[in-house]
Image: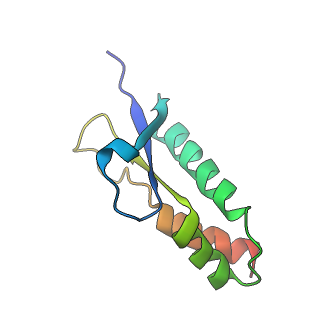
């Protein structure tokens, strides 16, 4: 059986019922799953009229999607994707 990394998406940081969460897909590696998560965050960051990195981040927190990765087993060390951390870094890159 092949291990797979599942990417799920919630409505950004608004605690949702599990029925509102959806599975984006399954990936053969953690790196592929993270790329899919980053693409979701990047798409959310592209849809704004923000003028500063802080405004862009607040816009993302308010209206963006929250992708996250579930690994093939709970004991995989260091295999974590944080949409918050990635979004903050991208906001600073996009609007320094």
Residue 30, above or below 83: above
Q: Tell me the residue at 73%/69% (across/down).
A: 48
Residue at 48 percent across and 32 percent down: it is 25
Residue 52 vertical position relative to residue 35 in the rendered view, above or below: below
x, y percentage for residue 40?
Answer: 60, 50
Task: Return the x and y of residue 61 as percentages of the image width and height.
Answer: 52, 71
- Residue 49 to residue 3: above or below: below
Is 46 situated left or right of 72 in this image? right
Q: Which of 39 and 28 is in front in this view?
A: 39
For the point 43% across and 40% down, which residue is it?
Answer: 22
Location of residue 12 in the rendering, given as x and y in whole percent from the top left corner: 47, 61
Choose top left, top right, bottom left or bottom right for residue 51.
Answer: bottom right
- Position of residue 71 in the picture relative to residue 57 (left or right): left
Tell me if residue 70 can be seen. Answer: no
For the point 77% across and 74% down, which residue is it?
49
Res 37 visible: yes
Occupied quadrant, residue 90? bottom right
How many marks overall? 0
Check the picture and name the quadrant holding the N terminus.
Answer: top left
- The image position of residue 60, as x and y in percent, is 59, 69
Say left or right for 11 vs 93: left
Where the C terminus falls, by quadrant? bottom right
């Amino acid at each position: 059986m092949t291990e797979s990394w599942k990417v799920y998406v919630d409505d950004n940081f608004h605690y949702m019922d599990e029925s509102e969460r959806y599975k984006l897909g399954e990936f053969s590696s953690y790196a592929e799953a993270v790329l899919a998560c980053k693409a979701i965050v990047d798409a959310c960051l592209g849809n704004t009229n923000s003028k500063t990195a802080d405004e862009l981040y607040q816009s993302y927190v308010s209206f963006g999607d929250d992708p996250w990765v579930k690994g093939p087993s709970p004991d995989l060390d260091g295999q974590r994707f944080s949409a918050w951390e990635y979004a903050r870094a991208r906001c600073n890159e996009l609007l320094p």
